[in-house]
Image (tube, rainbow, N blue to C red):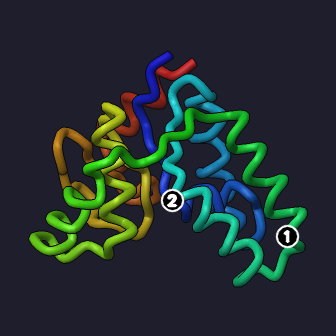
Amino acid sequence: MTALVALDTNILVYAAGLNDGLRFKAADAIRIALGPDRTLIATQVLGEFFNVLVGKFRQERSFARRACELWMQSATIRAPEANSFARAFELATEQHFQIWDALILVTAAEAGCRILVSEDMQHGFVHRGVTVVNPFAEPPHPLLADALRHAG
């Protein structure tokens, strides 16, 4: 089982279908196309997802918990390694990332991902072999288009 594509928090939020209908369709299509064997979610993303559901969308904690559990069943979940924070601090310092975004990107790199799907990071930025791809950018990034074409 090789997880090649990491998802950022905003993609999970859109896939939950609580706000933007067009982005829901795109995020859900990515989720379905990649399937559990090709999807990676960092533990940081799960925590952020829970907080967004409870905070911004005022969902019950039981709903947020179940939503996180569903993602845990349908993706590879990856925790940061011992040195991940040192690498994330370096990335945040040198490239001006928010520390938590840097940690997500570092975790994706440590897992061997080629793509991190995110709407709010630097589209096209490459770190340790991982390319940040905005799934809503036009034209679609060729790496994501290729990953989705060869999924399943």
Labelled disc at residue 152: none
Residue 36 spot, x, y in % from top left: 62, 28
Say which residue appears at 63% left-offset and 41% top-offset. Answer: 29
Residue 80 spot, x, y in % from top left: 40, 48
Say which residue appears at 9% left-offset and 70% top-offset. Answer: 94
Say which residue appears at 38% left-offset and 59% top-offset. Answer: 137
In the rendered structure, the answer to whether residue 145 lies left or right of residue 61 reads: left
Labelled disc at residue 44: 2
Q: Nearer the viewer, residue 91 or 113?
A: 91
Amino acid type shown at disc 2? Gln
Q: Secondary structure at mark 1?
A: helix
Task: Identify the mark nearer the N-term, 2 or 1.
Answer: 2
Which residue is the site of mark 1?
A: 61
Above or below 129: residue 68: below
* Mark 2 closeness class: few <14, some 14–19, many ≥20 residues within 10 Å: some
Q: Secondary structure at mark 2?
A: helix
